[in-house]
Image (cartoon, coloured by chain):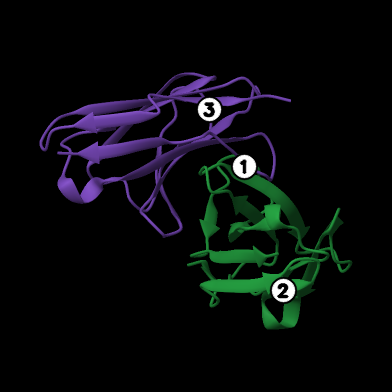
Chain colours: A purple, B green
Amino acid sequence: GGIITQTPKFLIGQEGQKLTLKCQQNFNHDTMYWYRQDSGKGLRLIYYSITENDLQKGDLSEGYDASREKKSSFSLTVTSAQKNEMAVFLCASSGGAEQFFGPGTRLTVL
Amino acid sequence: AQKVTQTQTSISVMEKTTVTMDCVYETQDSSYFLFWYKQTASGEIVFLIRQDSYKKENATVGHYSLNFQKPKSSIGLIITATQIEDSAVYFCAMREGDNNAGAKLTFGGGTRLTVRP
């Protein structure tokens, strides 16, 4: 088995601030994903990466950057935090059909 | 474009009964995969069960089973002998194609299940 860790668990930022969320996986999976989940809603894909240094946009990529410096880690940057971006950001990885999820980072923008 | 729809926003059942959660999907692909995930109150998302489009037999894992009706583009999740711990939000998801690299999931909006004692 493996595990996905996300840091930080809670992130509080100021409107307009640049914020970075980190994700690590030890499954040795090739593909990693970032999703956003608004309160009471489903998951929407922000970015994904099929291998080290690869980056693919999801449906919600505007306002975000991502970076996959190595196979085990994938970071997401909110380029300018906005109040309506308060949500949980979930990282996932996949080595086959199923995706496995991390515990999430809850973002609050003041 | 692929789309996944869960029309039931919430369901409440008595413990030890059977519940079915609905999910319909849209896809142009002949090959696709369907998944159900559970999100607990703590926010943890757990993979439950999967159906491959080319398989006619319904998948079963523990007390979870699927009702796959391909002509209707429908994949229902059935939970038998429900327990209090089954209370959660359940998400249906679809992945198109048979290439694992860069496989994207499209999620439905979720169904909140409450199991009452």
How many other residues sit within 10 Å of disc 3, few (<14), some (14-19) or many (≥20)?
Answer: some
* Res. B25 visible in picture: no
How many other residues sit within 10 Å of disc 2, few (<14), some (14-19) or many (≥20)?
Answer: some
Tell me the kind of residue under disc 3: Thr
- Report the chain holding disc 1: A
Q: Quadrant of residue A11?
A: top left
Measure how far apart labels 2 and 1 are at the Cα level: 23 Å
- Is residue B65 left or right of B14 when viewed as pictured? right
Counting from the top left corner in percent of width and height, residue B43 is at 51, 44
Q: Quadrant of residue A72?
A: top right
Q: Nearer the viewer, residue A35 or B16?
A: B16
* Res. A94 visible in picture: yes
Measure how far apart labels 3 and 2 are at the Cα level: 38 Å
Q: Nearer the viewer, residue A37 or B53?
A: A37
- Report the chain holding disc 3: A
Residue B20: numbered disc: 2
Whether callout 2 and callout 1 share a subunit is answered no
Q: Is residue A33 above or below residue B39?
A: above
Taking the spot 61% from the left edge, 65% from the top edge, the residue there is B114
For mark 3, give the secondary structure: loop
- Is residue A22 left or right of B23 when viewed as pictured? left
Residue A51: numbered disc: 3
- Is residue A85 left or right of A94 when viewed as pictured? left
Counting from the top left corner in percent of width and height, residue A7 is at 41, 23
